Amino acid sequence: MALKTPEQYVQSLRDGRVTYWDGERIDDITKHPRFRVPIATTAQDYDYDDPKLGALRRFRTEAGHEAHRIYQVPRSEEDLAKRIELLAHTGIGTAVSGVYMALMSVKDQVAAVNPQYAENIERMYRYCRDNDLRAAEVITDPKGDRKRRAHEQDDPDLYVRIVSRNNDGIVVRGAKLHITAASVIHELVVMPTKGMRQDETDYAVSFSIPVATKGVSIINRSFAPAELNAFDYPASSHHSMPEGFVVFDDVFVPWDRVFLAGEVQLASKLAQSLGLWERTGGVIAAVESSELFVGLAQLVTEMQGKESDMVAQASIAELITYAQMLKMSLDYACRHYEHTASGMVYPNTLAINAAKYYYAANYHQTVRYLHDLSGGLVLTLPLESDLRNPESGKFIRKYLYTKSNVDVETRMRVYNLIRDLTADAYGGWHFVVALQAGGGLSAQRFMMNRTYDIAGAKAKALAAAGAG
Ligand SMILES: Cc1cc2nc3c(=O)[nH]c(=O)nc-3n(C[C@H](O)[C@H](O)[C@H](O)COP(=O)(O)OP(=O)(O)OC[C@H]3O[C@@H](n4cnc5c(N)ncnc54)[C@H](O)[C@@H]3O)c2cc1C
């Protein structure tokens, strides 16, 4: 029942977990250079004494002890606002533990079908909260041929499934792909990727197990190499996180860790509950980055003496529109919150899906304005090592000069951030993440069609047409 220190978190990862990266089986991830940045990023969120963020990271549970706020179930608009503030200042290795918010938000519906599963959700939530553990969102199956359902695939394991059951628990087989931070957290929280039909009962499965469970192995991949310097890569040198290709090779899960085992009517509810919180996280990150884009665009424009140019001003206005629309949407989603029967507050479903859609559908075009303003140096700026070499450095300082109030090194830092965020490996990662993380565009379209007041809109249209 205690908060962990950053050191205790690092120590807790030495548990025999099976991980691979670059063809190598890694026995102790805490000593491997590949994991240095991801573990350091996640460890930061265990710093409860941080003068700026320590208080934001903690909350007092109903039992009277302190826990990480990522586990605070929002009960009011203020709680929700605090959660949004927390997520804006939290690494992805911690933010993914929000998977427990998704489970808690469907607990009432799960209880109506099987009270034991709901009890398991509550107990596992408290276990993770009270032991200061982190959990991953383990949803996306390989899915094989998208035209065919889970049980119709040539290989029956292309969606995670139950292969046997006994008095003690279930045995599962399959894989989940793209799982953010899977190797650096403690619990893998598995859920169905979508709704399942009556003949797919073995695929309607959800549970939580420790990463080091027998039969689990994780193959890692990240956009970032082991080391990047902070001058040339101001964002990705301290933000990288591997995604995991997580394999469940006949893994035993005891009944007290099972949240769903065959009740197909719950599969889509679980899948959708996570979608909402994932998309909320995506929108929060987009609010932050879109504001950065405005600042970067204004800086490069001023540094190059283009601030009175009409085209530059029009481009910046486009970037401002994008940033402001996202900020207002998030604000609306929190003010018009919804709640479960037992009083858990969550962001407005329609507003979050519309915001995530707007963010994803317009991301690439919006970044284009920043690239257009910035010019070719986004890609061709010399490296810090050449700046520091006196022979080459003197030429770089001479020819990157624009005017007396612009420091060349600051100008380089601005360009490096633009490239790192939008045009290099991390930028490429963002281009795909904007679209796919939290589900592709069609996932949000589907939710908007389901949650918009279409009947009300139809009635208004009929009335306006004089037929209502
Ligand atoms: C960096 C990153 C991090 C991620 N982190 C996580 C994570 O932590 N946990 C997790 O569970 N997932 C995670 N994801 C996975 C993400 O949710 C999926 O990539 C996304 O839902 C799309 O699924 P897919 O990749 O299987 O592609 P597909 O299912 O192939 O989808 C690609 C496109 O095809 C469309 N499509 C799919 N099926 C059909 C069909 N039958 N007919 C017509 N069109 C179809 C989709 O709508 C979409 O537009 C992550 C993804 C990325 C890129």
Image (cartoon, rainbow, N blue to C red):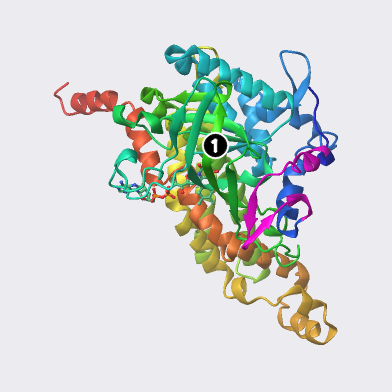
User: Does the magenta portion include 47?
Assistant: no
Where are the magenta residues, as a range? 8-31
Q: Amino acid at mark 1?
A: Val
Judge left or right: residue 409 versus residue 117: right
Asked whether 251 or 54 is in front, the reply is: 251
Mark 1 neighbour class, 10 Å CA radius: few under 14, some 14 to 19, many 20 or more: some
Judge left or right: residue 261 versus residue 70: left
Quadrant location of the C terminus? Answer: top left
Instruction: Give percent across and percent down for residue 226.
Output: 71, 62
Q: Secondary structure at mark 1?
A: strand
Instruction: Give percent across and percent down for residue 60.
Output: 75, 19
Q: Look at the image and tell me whether residue 82 can be seen.
A: no
Look at 33% across and 32% down and name the residue there. 200
Asked whether 283 or 411 is in front, the reply is: 283
Q: Look at the image and tell me whether residue 426 can be seen.
A: yes
Asked whether 415 or 300 is in front, the reply is: 415
Asked whether 7 or 448 is in front, the reply is: 7
Instruction: Give percent across and percent down for residue 244.
Output: 58, 49
Identify whether 430 is placed above or below 112: below
Location of mark 1 (residue) = 251
Judge left or right: residue 228 versus residue 361: right
Look at 23% across and 27% down and name the residue there. 458
Identify whether 335 is placed above or below 323: above
Q: Is mark 1 within 8 Å of ligand 1?
A: no
- State the count of labels: 1
Look at 59% across and 66% down and name the residue there. 424
Identify whether 186 is placed above or below 76: below
User: Does the magenta portion include 19?
Assistant: yes
- Return the residue found at the far bottom: 391
Quadrant location of the N terminus? Answer: top right
